[in-house]
Image (cartoon, rainbow, N blue to C red):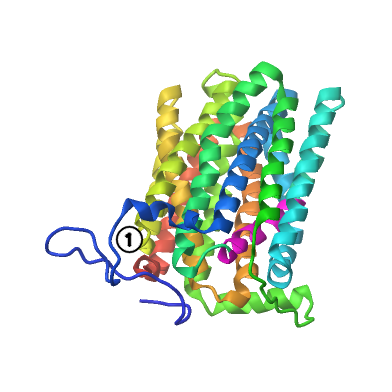
């Protein structure tokens, strides 16, 4: 079994006992459904969880409305890709600055700044839309500015969880974060689609702005231990170079980052095409788009809750590899379907497989990484999404525009499947990480 360092909390291999009950080799630890919400026993994490939950409902309403608004203004699947690409440009420039900042400075203060910035941008977007002065190029600008905020917010948000719970419940907290995020994914898009249909996109943007009050208020109520940050005066480039050298010595974390990179570049592309799929394939409207988003979120919630419950008892490396194989198969099947209900069922499964990959990847990285590199390594993790997902959006938008929406999904599924075969041959060690 491989370990990054002797202090990493990699769980043991599970061997079913003779009586068939589910146990693990930890004294006084029994399988219990109560383990699902263990992290919520920490007051600071509870404040974080509920503040983020409320804010994420608004964020998903805006995300859903924003994507459909773009398609409504331009009637172009390619423009959906352009906006996704614009949101990712800042990740290439600022993600590693964000990681260094998360290692050097107060994470709660960084989150105050980033969350306030996102709130103000939501209100400005609503104002532009209410007054009717909004143009497609404005949406590109808003996507770019949001990307800057996310480049600092994402690595800090992931690293911040380590300050809210004890190490033994860190994986549970990560899984509950996924549950929180995807509960909002399941409900927020449907609410956004309905609100869009009844009142227009501006109200979706306004509701999102208001929702940030919850997370800002709860951040102010936290009673956090003082954490000493190391700041040796090195440049950002030196700090990032140190993290790269650290990753070169850890093949496991590097392999996991490669998985998330491919998932973001080619697995998430279907999400970019939801508005076009809803209108051109399913002959629906903004409400249809919202339900497609919600179906993906529903599957993600279900799988995230399962992981939160059983994470101490499963072989996480093996389940990660299984999800990497299963996702392209589901995308392949999805590309041939033309039914609303079949789309919903398949998206529930696809959403579950996507969150399984992200959740297990994040959990393995967090338990293996050295604390002094946590922010920077997590900036590489978030970089794989915020930088490569937009590139994947640009790619799939271009293919959909020139060869058809269903063909674009089919091509991505084949690319992911071939990646898995090659990766599995060269990285057999990942399946034995526990």
- The location of residue 351, given as percent across then percent down, is 46, 41
The reply, left or right, for residue 411 in relation to residue 91 is left
Residue 258 drawn in magenta = no
The residue at the far left in this view is 18
Reading the image, the residue beneath label 1 is 314
Q: Is residue 404 visible?
A: no
Residue 393 lies, with reference to residue 295, above or below; the image says below
Q: In the picture, residue 23 is in which quadrant?
A: bottom left
Which residue is at a point 52% across and 67% down the rendered structure image? Answer: 366
- The location of residue 236, given as percent across then percent down, is 77, 73
Q: Secondary structure at mark 1?
A: loop
Highlighted range, magenta? 148-163
Q: Quadrant of the C terminus?
A: bottom left
| Circle count | 1
The reply, left or right, for residue 125 in relation to residue 277 is right
Q: Is residue 280 visible?
A: yes
Q: Quadrant of the N terminus?
A: bottom left
């Amino acid at each position: 079994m491989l370990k990054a360092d002797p202090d990493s909390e990699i769980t043991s291999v599970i061997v079913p006992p003779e009586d068939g009950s589910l146990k693990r080799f930890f004294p006084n630890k029994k399988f219990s459904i109560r383990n699902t919400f263990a992290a919520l026993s920490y007051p600071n994490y509870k404040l974080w969880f509920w503040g983020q939950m409320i804010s994420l409902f608004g964020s998903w309403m805006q995300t859903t409305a924003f994507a459909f608004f773009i398609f409504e203004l331009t009637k172009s699947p390619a423009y959906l890709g352009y906006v996704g690409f614009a949101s990712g440009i800042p990740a290439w420039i600022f993600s590693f600055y964000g990681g260094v900042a998360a290692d050097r400075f107060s994470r709660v203060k960084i989150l105050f700044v980033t969350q306030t910035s996102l709130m103000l941008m939501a209100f400005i977007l609503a104002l532009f839309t209410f007054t009717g002065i909004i143009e497609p190029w404005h949406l590109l600008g808003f996507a770019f500015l949001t990307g800057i905020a996310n480049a600092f917010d994402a690595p800090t948000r992931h690293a911040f969880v380590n300050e809210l719970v004890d190490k033994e419940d860190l994986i549970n907290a990560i899984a509950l974060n996924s549950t929180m995020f995807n509960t909002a994914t399941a409900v927020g898009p449907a609410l956004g689609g309905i609100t869009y249909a009844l009142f227009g996109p501006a109200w979706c943007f306004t509701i999102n702005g208001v929702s940030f009050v919850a997370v800002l208020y709860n951040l102010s109520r936290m009673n956090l231990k003082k954490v000493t940050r190391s700041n040796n005066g090195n440049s950002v480039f030196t700090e990032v170079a140190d993290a790269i050298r650290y990753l070169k010595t850890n093949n496991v974390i590097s392999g996991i980052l490669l998985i998330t990179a491919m998932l973001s570049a080619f697995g998430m592309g279907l999400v970019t095409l939801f508005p076009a799929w809803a209108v051109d394939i399913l002959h629906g409207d903004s409400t249809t788009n919202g339900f497609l988003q919600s179906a993906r979120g529903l599957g993600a919630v279900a799988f995230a809750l399962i992981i939160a419950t059983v994470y101490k008892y499963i072989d996480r490396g093996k389940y990660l590899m299984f999800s990497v194989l299963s996702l392209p198969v589901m995308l392949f099947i999805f590309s041939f379907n033309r039914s609303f209900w079949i789309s919903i069922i398949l998206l529930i499964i696809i959403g579950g497989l996507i969150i399984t990959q992200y959740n297990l990847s994040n959990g393995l990285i967090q338990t293996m990484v050295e604390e002094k590199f946590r922010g920077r390594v997590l900036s590489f993790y978030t970089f794989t999404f915020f930088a490569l997902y937009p590139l994947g959006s640009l790619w799939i938008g271009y293919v959909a525009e020139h060869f058809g929406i269903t063909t674009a999904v089919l091509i991505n599924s084949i690319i992911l499947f071939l990646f898995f075969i090659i990766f599995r041959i060269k990285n057999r060690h990942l399946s034995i990480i526990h």
